[in-house]
Image (cartoon, rainbow, N blue to C red):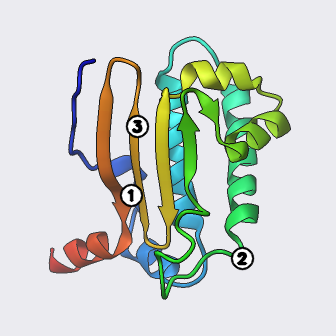
Amino acid sequence: MLLMCVGVVPISYMPKSQEDCLSTSTTTMKSEIDSAVNFLSTILRSGGVGLSADQLMSFRRCLEATLVTRYRDHWFPDRPQRGSAYRCVRIVNRKLDCLLSSAAAAAGVPAPLLERLLPTELTLWVDPDEVGHHWCYLWFQLAIPLFYNCHRLCQISSKV
């Protein structure tokens, strides 16, 4: 098995301004959920032939609603690690997390199609002010521990 690790911070998953950072320090989880949904959508879009643009948009909306509902009472900005396992989205040996399956069913997207397009293994942590992931295909593994960190972005932008 080929093992490859990359440590890149995809800018497109980060908030656009320092004001976005300030809003995530409250109980809103919009930036974090947007980052997670954007990340998964990017994988689905790059997966080749599969989802139409309409199916992808429908899946995005349903996934966002599913995550908001799931995380609503399990979001603790003052203690971000509390509830982290509950907010984790997993794919293990191509078996979709129930959150992904539910969003796919609500969007009318066949689960086997998602299983084919998404990585073989994926762990996605959606925590207050942080979103990180680890994923791999059968032949390729990518580890990016963090691609969204609001506090780090705000500190960087305040120094510029």
Residue 38 place in picture, x, y as percent: 52, 45
Residue 101 place in picture, x, y as percent: 74, 37
Which amino acid, mark 2? Answer: Asp
Q: Residue at x 48, y 39 (%)?
A: 122
Vertical relation: 33 (above or below) 118? below
Q: Would residue 53 be found to the left or right of residue 127 on screen?
A: right
- Mark 3 burial class by Cα count in 10 Å: few <14, some 14-19, many 20+: some
| Residue ID for mark 2 | 73
Quadrant into which the C terminus falls: bottom left
Of the two numbered discs 2 and 3 on the same chain, state the one appearing first in sequence: 2
Foreground residue, 96 or 68? 96
Q: Nearer the viewer, mark 1 or mark 2?
A: 2
Which amino acid, mark 1? Answer: Met
Q: Is residue 52 visible?
A: no
Tag 2, which secondary structure? Answer: loop
Tag 3, which secondary structure? Answer: strand
Q: Is residue 38 visible?
A: yes
Of the two numbered discs 3 and 1 on the same chain, state the one appearing first in sequence: 1
Q: Residue at x 49, y 73 (%)?
A: 128
Q: Report, in whole angstroms, how far the alpha carbon at label 3 lies from the one at label 1.
A: 19 Å
- Residue 4 placement: quadrant: top left
Q: Report, in whole angstroms, how far the alpha carbon at label 1 lies from the one at label 2.
A: 24 Å
- Residue 3 placement: quadrant: top left
Of the two numbered discs 1 and 2 on the same chain, state the one appearing first in sequence: 1
